Amino acid sequence: MSVEEKCPECGSEHVYNDGSLWVCPDCGHECSELGAAKGPEIRDANGNVLADGDTVTVIKDLKIKGSSQVVKGGTKVKNIHLTDGADGHDIACKIPGIGAMNLKSEFVKKA
């Protein structure tokens, strides 16, 4: 069996297709797709897992490239969006008073 035909919960190879669902008889898990790729977990500076829509706090002053503005440590950022930033900036957000920008998760903590 291929990797796609294993239960994502317990790893059992005994999954079967029941209409639009895949069912695992060993653990009872049901899902619509097998092998659906989950992105890597994005963690904050303290190791907490972040999710879309979370509120985070900036932990240190961050200079904005190409500007004289600074994002002050302690700034709360609401409703973040996790991205697949190749340059390390894995959080897209709007910062009050500054606007839309990307942040690195290592400079924020979950609020």
Image (cartoon, rainbow, N blue to C red):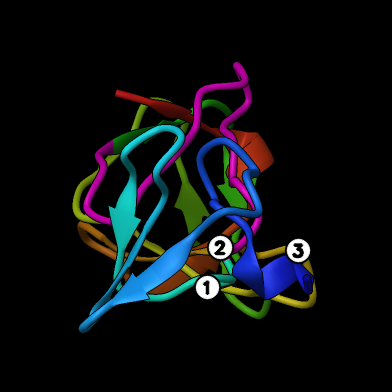
Mark 2: few, some, or many residues within 10 Å (few <14, many ≥20)?
Answer: few
Span highlighted in magenta in the image = 38-55
Q: Is residue 69 above or below residue 99?
A: above
Q: Secondary structure at mark 3?
A: loop
Q: Is residue 2 above or below residue 89?
A: below
- Residue 54 falls within the magenta-colored stretch: yes
Q: Amino acid at mark 3?
A: Gly
* Residue 86, horizontal then vertical, whole percent: 77, 77
Q: Earlier in the sequence, mark 3 or mark 1?
A: 1
Q: Are marks 2 and 1 in contact (CB under 8 Å)?
A: yes
The image quarter in which residue 11 lies: top right
Q: Residue under circle 2? A: 38
Q: How far is mark 3 from mark 1, CA to CA? A: 24 Å
Q: Residue 36, labelled with which disc?
A: 1
The image quarter in which residue 2 lies: bottom right
Q: Amino acid at mark 2?
A: Lys
Q: Is residue 72 above or below residue 83?
A: above
Q: Earlier in the sequence, mark 3 or mark 2?
A: 2
Q: Secondary structure at mark 2?
A: loop
Q: Residue under circle 3? A: 88
Mark 3: few, some, or many residues within 10 Å (few <14, many ≥20)?
Answer: few
Q: Secondary structure at mark 1?
A: loop
Q: How far is mark 2 from mark 1, CA to CA? A: 6 Å
Mark 1: few, some, or many residues within 10 Å (few <14, many ≥20)?
Answer: few
